[in-house]
Image: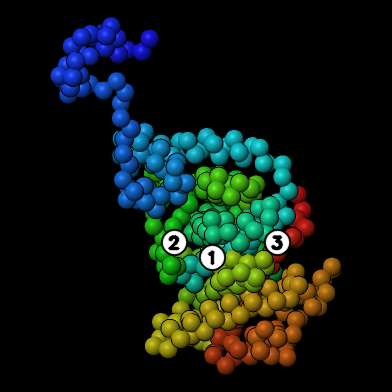
């Protein structure tokens, strides 16, 4: 029998009388704990920083006695365990859709990542796209892990754009980059890793999400006075930073005369030159995306229309070859511009294992 007071259980006359019943109800503790009433404003506050269904947010706050920080910890623990189980269930599903995301930081660093999902519906979902952008920003902000800390200035025909190992990127803390792309916030001790972000996104999309590949470039720091490296990025089929096709390029710029490029950039008209160089890099990335570009120059397995330098510069507004347009562009500004490296990725590319 439930633990009701003995007087009530045995039918006491005092309890059965009106005065006795009133006295009992006013002085005795309730038989069950009343549920915690969760204010709607508190639910909204929790969901703003930790987007989960309303019922789940209410449960977390009830369990945490209306403590938002404790509720977040409760959700993180519960969500992680649930997401791990769900990820295991969907791991074998085909991920033929997705997006290519790019991030350009301060005109000095660039990254491109491909994130895959199962359906085009999720590929256009804000949760999925936000995760892709965040991963691209993280890859752009971080240096590619290497055993050789020395990073000489790349020369033409060398790989300036480096593969960012998936394992290293997945275990890295997600870096938050402001909208202006200038200074990223340092990750806190409680920052989510890229893998955790993907699990959280999987929890909301219910699809298998997979980081397919990542690559990045970082200009040498400090830069040399004679050479300036300028990256550019472009995507098509989405917004400014995500799309079905993405491209990145890296330019090497030197002064054409006796004046080094560092001095030219530091001169009063240097700011405009720097802006023009970044615009050129973006337009060249657009050219890379607009054509089936495979390499800088034609060669074995690469036709002229697949080689950037020998393509007609249609997306730069010219009917001349890209190499000629870039050379003329530099002559007009007293600089020598070389295209050091490029990458073009598309959702659906055949990728070697």
Indicate the secondary structure of the residue bearing disc 1.
strand
Expressed as whole percent of the image width and height from the top left, the position of residue 143 reads 52, 56
Q: Position of residue 296 (x, y in %)?
A: 72, 73
In the image, residue 130 lies at what x, y percent?
Answer: 52, 58
Quadrant assignment, res 237: bottom right
Q: Mark 3 points at which residue?
A: 347
Read off the residue under disc 1: 103
Neighbour class for label 3 at 10 Å: few (<14), some, many (≥20)?
some
Asked if disc 1 and disc 2 are in contact, CB closer than 8 Å, the reply is yes
Task: Using residue 289 as the reference point, say whether residue 189 is left or right of it.
Answer: left
**Residue 24 vertical position relative to residue 292 in the rendered view, above or below:** above
In the image, 184 versus 330, the foreground residue is 184
Q: In which quarter of the image is the N terminus?
A: top left
- The colour scheme applied to this rendered structure is rainbow
Q: Nearer the viewer, mark 1 or mark 3?
A: 3
User: Rounded to the nearest whole Å, what is the CA distance between mark 1 and mark 2?
Assistant: 10 Å
Q: Residues within 10 Å of mark 2 (few under 14, many from 20)?
A: some
């Amino acid at each position: 029998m439930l633990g009701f007071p003995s007087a009530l259980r045995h039918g006491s006359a005092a309890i059965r009388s009106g005065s006795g019943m009133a006295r009992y109800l006013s002085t005795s503790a309730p038989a069950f704990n009343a549920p915690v009433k969760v204010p709607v404003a508190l639910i909204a506050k929790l969901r703003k920083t930790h987007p989960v269904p309303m019922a789940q947010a209410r449960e977390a706050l009830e369990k945490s006695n209306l403590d938002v920080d404790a509720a977040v910890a409760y959700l993180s623990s519960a969500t992680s365990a649930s997401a791990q189980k769900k990820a295991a269930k969907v791991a074998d599903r085909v991920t033929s859709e997705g997006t290519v995301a790019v991030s350009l930081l301060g005109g000095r660093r660039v990254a491109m990542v491909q994130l895959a999902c199962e359906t085009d519906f999720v590929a256009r979902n804000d949760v999925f796209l936000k995760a892709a952008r965040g991963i691209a920003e993280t890859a752009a902000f971080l240096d590619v892990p290497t055993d050789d800390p020395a990073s000489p200035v790349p020369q033409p025909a060398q790989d300036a754009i480096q593969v960012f190992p998936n394992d290293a990127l997945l275990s890295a803390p997600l870096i938050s980059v402001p909208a202006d792309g200038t200074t990223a916030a340092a990750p806190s001790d409680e920052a989510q890793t890229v893998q955790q972000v993907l699990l959280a996104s999987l929890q909301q999309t219910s699809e298998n999400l997979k980081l397919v590949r990542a690559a990045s470039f970082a200009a040498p720091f400090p830069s040399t006075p004679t050479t300036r490296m300028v990256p550019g990025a472009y995507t098509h089929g989405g917004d400014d930073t995500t799309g079905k096709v993405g491209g990145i390029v890296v330019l090497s710029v030197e002064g054409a005369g006796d004046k080094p490029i560092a001095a030219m950039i530091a001169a009063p008209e240097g700011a405009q030159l720097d802006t023009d160089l970044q615009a050129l890099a973006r337009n060249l990335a657009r050219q890379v995306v607009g054509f089936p570009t495979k390499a800088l120059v034609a060669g074995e397995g690469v036709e002229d229309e697949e080689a950037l330098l020998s393509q007609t510069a249609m997306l730069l507004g010219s009917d001349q070859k890209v190499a000629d347009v870039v050379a003329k562009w530099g002559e007009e500004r007293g600089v020598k511009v070389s295209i050091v490296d490029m990458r073009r990725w598309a959702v659906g590319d055949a990728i070697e294992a």
